[in-house]
Amino acid sequence: NAGVTQTPKFRILKIGQSMTLQCTQDMNHNYMYWYRQDPGMGLKLIYYSVGAGITDKGEVPNGYNVSRSTTEDFPLRLELAAPSQTSVYFCASSYTGGYGYTFGSGTRLTVV
Amino acid sequence: AQRVTQPEKLLSVFKGAPVELKCNYSYSGSPELFWYVQYSRQRLQLLLRHISRESIKGFTADLNKGETSFHLKKPFAQEEDSAMYYCALSEKGNTDKLIFGTGTRLQVFP
């Protein structure tokens, strides 16, 4: 049982480059989330989805885009990378929030 | 606005000492609260949730609506408890988004 799988684990981007962070879950969870974790700042919600075809912005969506074409996948797209996007990104899923989230292992992104 | 506050960035104790990690929240409705833990080089994982009133790894947390607090407690800390602890509040509804506090690093010395 893989749970939530994120790829890549590490990435260095140059300013202005684009990339997609992949997130896949095999638990048939309806809800999926993307958070970023900055030192001393906790986790901030970027985007979330309550089911295939439905996405919505979180607290810090600027500079990111998402899609949810299947229940399993919830990729996060960075179009024009900026140094402010240097962070650790976590994907999570839940059947319903009352039971808590299952997190991926994270992607450490550095923009230089 | 909904907010979760963890006032301590770092809490250091010796093995066997009691531990209390503080969490205060502001929320207009009836909250669902959680504690998550992140051990070194591991992913975030759910430690416990208030609705289940359980004890996990010796940790307990009681929701105090009067004081709007959800402090995490353990009577005797162990070295393996050293980790980052996050308190989180769920916005109940059809999204169940979690709002996280800034986290408290617990260091347990031998």
Image: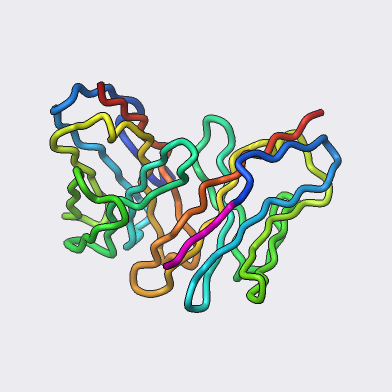
Q: Residue at 56% across / 49% down in the picture?
A: B86
Q: Quadrant of residue A53?
A: bottom left
Going by the image, does A75 lie left or right of B11?
Answer: left
Seen from the viewer's position, the closer of residues A16 and A51 is A16
Q: Which residues are magenta?
A: B1-6
Q: In the figure, is residue B55 to the left or right of B30?
A: right
Q: Quadrant of residue B16?
A: top right
Give how far across and how far down residue B18 sits, in percent. Answer: 82, 47
- Split into 4 quadrants, where in the image is the N terminus of chain B? bottom left
Residue B82 screen position, x and y as percent: 68, 36
Vertical position of residue B75 compared to residue A100: above or below: above
Question: Residue A44 or A72: which is nearer the viewer?
Answer: A44
Residue at image coords 62%, 57%: B23
Question: Residue drawn 26% across and 39% down?
Answer: A22
Q: Is residue A112 above or below residue B16?
A: above
| Residue A70 belongs to magenta span | no
In the image, is B62 to the left or to the right of A69? right
Q: Residue at x 61, y 69 (%)?
A: B68
A27 is higher (above) or lower (below) than B62 = above
Residue nearest the observer in this picture, B49 or A70: B49
